Amino acid sequence: MPDLTAVQRICGLLDRGEIDRVQFLEQLTRQMAEEIGCERAAVRMMINSPEGAALRSMAMFDAVRGELVRVPDMTGHDSDAYFDTLLREGCVVAPDCRSHPATLPFLAGYFELQGVQSLLDVAFSVNGVLYGSFSCEQRSATMGWTPQQLKMLRQMASRASLTLMHAITAQIDTTPGALWEPSTPNRLMTMPMPLDVGKTDE
């Protein structure tokens, strides 16, 4: 069994109000990078874009730089191949983003721009509803993701998903004229996320 002690501790800190959502995301993605042994780890949410369904990073930790970084949305035409795989299999395991059918829609708009060679994504879902992904990336070389790495990321996602969902939906906007709909999926796509945390990745 994977050791989820660190993730449980991070979730507990948020549940007890000892850290806020921004700190939770930073600590979680840092732990993901450490446990999986990847160069970058992120939590991404599904959004709507002019090109269709896309993914937006709520937080990405770069283990090489030792800090959170900002990255562009993962957008691309005909992204159904990615989301269909994520829904059907619960994960996308792409040792080479340049040739995997599920990652090809994002090749020009994200992977080539960011220099990402390998991707390991596990579905971020609650009660069977897909909201995004827990994502690991490798840039320096391709990565032959192991069953152990996939199992660990699945377990971390399973443990953190409900806590993350509670953190997102518990925040109530008190600003006059809130622009998002009250339903959870719409709020997830439109509510402010800590995108100003970390430096832009160049």
Image (spheres, grey):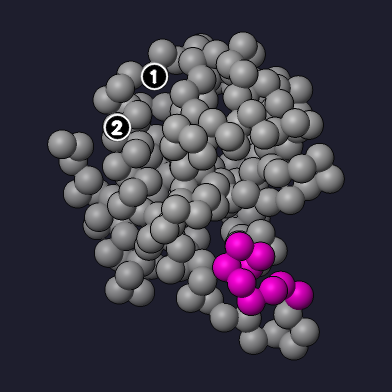
Q: Position of residue 51 (x, y in %)?
A: 81, 40
Residue neighbourhood size for the residue with mark 2, other residues' Cα within 10 Å, grouped as few (<14), some (14–19), many (≥20): some
- The residue wearing badge 1 is 145
Q: In which quarter of the image is residue 122?
A: top left
The front one of 60 and 122 is 122
* Number of marks drawn: 2
The front one of 52 and 146 is 52
The front one of 93 and 64 is 93
Q: Position of residue 171 (x, y in %)?
A: 53, 76
- The residue wearing badge 2 is 151
Q: Where is residue 173 in the image (x, y as percent from the top left)?
A: 63, 81
The magenta stretch is 179-187
Q: In which quarter of the image is residue 178?
A: bottom right
Q: Position of residue 186 (x, y in %)?
A: 66, 65
Q: Does the magenta stretch include residue 180?
A: yes
Q: Is residue 1 magenta?
A: no
Name the kind of residue labelled 1 in the image: Trp
> Which mark sits nearer the N-terminus, 1 or 2?
1
143 lies above or below 172: above
Q: How far apart are marks 1 and 2 (CA)?
A: 10 Å
Q: In this view, does 112 lie to the left or right of 51?
A: left
Q: Is residue 179 left or right of residue 97?
A: right
SS under mark 2: helix
Assign the N terminus to one quadrant of the image: top left
Instruction: Residue at 60% x, 24% y: name it.
Output: 102
Residue neighbourhood size for the residue with mark 1, other residues' Cα within 10 Å, grouped as few (<14), some (14–19), many (≥20): some
Instruction: Residue at 64% x, 86% y: name it.
Output: 174
Name the kind of residue labelled 2 in the image: Lys
Instruction: Residue at 77% x, 84% y: name it.
Output: 177
Work out whether residue 35 can be spotted: no
Assign the C terminus to one quadrant of the image: top right
